[in-house]
Structures are given as structure tokens and as C-alpha cells.
Image (cartoon, rainbow, N blue to C red):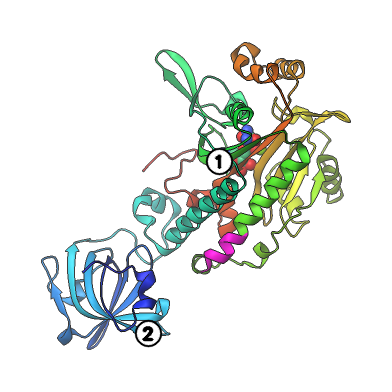
Amino acid sequence: MTATAIHTLQSHLGDQVTVHGWVTHFRSSGKIHFLMVRDGTGVVQCIIRPGQAVLEGPWVTEWDQLGTEMAVSLDGTVHADPRAPGGVEISLTRLRVLSESPDYPIQPKEHGVDFLLDHRHLWIRSPRQAAILRIRSRIIHAIRNFLDDQGFVVTDPPIITPAAAEGTTTLFEIDYFGEPAYLSQSGQLYLEALAMALGRVYSFGPTFRAEKSKTRRHLMEFWMVEPEIAFCEFEENLEWQERLVSHVVQTVLRECQDELKTLNRDVSRLAAVIPPFPRITYDEAVERLNQAGYGIAWGEDLGAPHETALAEMFDRPVFLTHFPKAIKAFYMQPDPERPDRVLAADLLAPEGYGEIVGGSQRIHDLSVLEARMRETGLDPERYQWYLDLRRYGSVPHSGFGMGLERLVAWIAGLEHVRETIPFPRTLNRVWP
Ligand code: 4AD
Ligand code: MG
């Protein structure tokens, strides 16, 4: 008999089924035993009445030898039971133990973060971690659906690159047959070329930053979705962002109710994530922060505490716009009314999750772009192909990058981005 997925058992009431999975818990109350089994889609409680169920070896000979994470194949009959997780229970007729699992390292007690990260390959089996990874999967799906439906072409910029896209201080250098090359910090420069070929494009891939920051928001390897849109100016770019973010949040609220419950996520604040999102300029932000006693001089970059304080002033994500050009990337379009600032925006998530999206209108004038490169210490010679985009049919265009892990951390309500990715790469960890 082929195995039945645990999350579909509701539609098999009264049936004899086979389930393949792993033991999560065994307990005995005199004559009856209770066995919890998970299969990746869910968890089911099995009732064992020893006289009525057969136990097949070779790994165990007694029911009470069943241990955490042994792999099993079982047969039984499905019954409704409102008290059981998932509302169903299986009366076991046969259990075959497929493999052993002696002294499983992760026990139902408090473990330290380092211990758990050292055992990340096993930790991902726990209900909380599995719920997070399922939410991550739904989020990826929702992002792709939204962009595909809006006529964006998915495309793949290179990961090995000859020059910086987001500042030279966070480059991971590799030896490319004797020449230095770098892991991509962002596909943006290539996406600008692709937008001129295809109109609306996006990439969704891994990006790399050698960030010397040990915070709850930084990874060295993270996934970014980067839409880039030809003939698109600043305000339209913000509209794409708010529509995408609210689509993702509303999809997760609808489709991941069980996972959000497993995580004890307070979903009331997510329900408010509907466009339009408020917009405040950098100037207004500085003023508001100074009223709140922060003492910031105009031109200073804002840090995590400032972002949190600003986000707390609103009930949904807020766009922070028109930054001083000195603290932003070389490719950002100067504001025609105030050339000391740029047409860029960061989208700040509520509840202290900080910047989840960074975007801007790009400079489309050749001489302005060359001048900005020199000002920021970049050699235009190394970017000739990128400058060609301003020589041949240049048009106003905009785009943004949304960090997947920060988005997942916010939506799932997590303390730290390290739990949002299967195998996190942080300042002091590249293992396992
Ligand atoms: O603001 P950033 O640096 O923007 C860019 O890279 C643009 N070139 C994107 C574009 O316009 N196509 O990064 C974009 C987002 C941030 O808002 C944040 O969510 C995420 O990427 N991010 C990180 N996430 C985890 N760990 C890090 N070290 C991150 N650095 C950026
Ligand atoms: Mg940014």
C-alpha cells in the first residue's frame, strides 16, 4: 500500500492506511501506549493496544524501546478524535521499525543556541523549525506568483562577478584563475541590462556580503528577490513594493494558519499590512527622532534603534525616502529638486524588524552616473558595460531588493534571521 500523508488523514476517516515517518514521542499508560509520528506533512497520534498490534524488528523487540527519530512504517485505522493533534488518531495494527536512532541529541528540553546550530541538520526536524521552513516556502511561492502574474520575466544574473554592486567593503573575494572576482552582493546592475531587454524582470537568488556585523538581522549569505522595471519612476517603484509585500503577508495569513499557530505568532499586526504604506522623508525621520530625544545630525546614517523607533510610530510598514546622497549607493538618481538627496527608499517592517526592502530610481544620464562613480571611488573603466546602458536607449528605470530572510523573520515573528534559512552563514559560523 502506498503511504498516506499525515496532513490528509482527515479525509480518510474509517480507512485502513499506511503511514511512513519518524517517531517523535512514546508514552505508556498501563495497557495502552501512545505513539506520536511525524512524516514532514504533520504529526499523528497512534494508539497501541499491545494484543492487537504487531511490532516488527529487527531494531526493537518491545514497544517501550521505541525512541525519538526512529524511522517507522505503520498500518492502522483512522478515527476522528477532537482531542488529538490534527483531530484524528490511528489505531495501530502493525508497526515496522525501519532504522534505529540511539541517543538522539535533541531532547524536549532547553538547549543552548550554539548546541542547536551545531546540530542544525537535526534541529530542522523540530516542529518549530519545520513550520518556519514551510512558511519560507510559501513566501517564495507567493513572491513568484505575484511577479509572474504581473508580467515580470524571471532571470538569473551571475553569482561570480568582476566588480562591486553594493560597496567595496563587504565583498567576498575569490580566485578566478589568477584574477580576483567576487561573489554577488546584488544582481541589480545586470538586472538593469535585462530590464532594457525584457521590460519587467526579477531575479531570486543567493547574495553574499562579508558583513562584519553580528546582529539579529545580518547573514553572510542571504536570498534576495530583485525586481527591475524599465520606464518606472520613484513613486511607481514604491507602489510595486507595497503591493508585493501585502500580497505576501495576506497569502501567509490565509495559507499558513497552522504554522503561525505553532510559532505562537500574534497575527493581529499582520492583518493591517494593506497598501498604501505611509511614506516619510529622511528629513522628517530625523525631525521625529530628534523630538523623541535621539540627537541625530542631518546626513547621519540611521541605525537599528532608529529604524525600530520610527517603525513603532506606524501600524504597518513605512517607507523612509529621500536619503542624503552621501550615505547611499552610487547608482541612485539625485532628486531634481534637491540634488543633495536621492530618490531612494527603505521599507521598514513593524515590530523592530528593520529594513526589509531597499530600492531606488537609477541614474539614467551617462555623465551624471560617471561623475557619481568617481565621487564614490569606483573606476568607470570597470563598469563600461553598465555605462553602455546609458549610451544606448537609456530610460528612467527603478527597482528594489527584498531580503527573504528578514521578510520571513518578520512574518513568522522570530527573534533572529538565523532560524529563517536552512543552514545559516553568520559571522562566526560556516558549519554544518
Ligand atoms: O538595501 P540593499 O543593500 O539593496 C541592494 O542590494 C540593491 N542593489 C537592491 C536592488 O535595488 N536591486 O539590500 C536589499 C535588502 C535589504 O533591504 C535587506 O532586506 C536584505 O537585502 N539584506 C540582508 N539580509 C540579510 N543579511 C544581510 N547581510 C543583508 N543585507 C541586505
Ligand atoms: Mg539597504
Mark 2 and ligand 1: say if the CB distance to the nearest ligand atom is below 8 Å.
no
Q: Which residue is mark 2?
A: 80
Quadrant assignment for the C terminus = top left
Residue sitting at x 50%, y 53%? 136
Give the x, y percent position of residue 341: 81, 31
Q: Which residue is mark 1?
A: 224
Vertical arrangement, residue 130 with respect to residue 223, above or below: below
Question: Quick check: marks 2 and 1 in contact, CB under 8 Å?
Answer: no
State the predominant SS element of the stretch in magenta.
helix
Magenta span contains residue 86: no
Mark 1 element type:
strand
Side of 132 where 339 appears, left or right: right
Residue 180 place in picture, x, y as percent: 47, 16
Instruction: Specify start and end residues of the magenta stretch as a single range.
Output: 250-257
Mark nearer the N terminus (2 vs 1): 2
Quadrant placement of the N terminus:
bottom left
The residue located at (85%, 44%) in the rendering is 284
Q: Is residue 253 magenta?
A: yes
Percent position of residue 90, x then y: 29, 80
Cβ of mark 1 under 8 A from ligand 1: yes
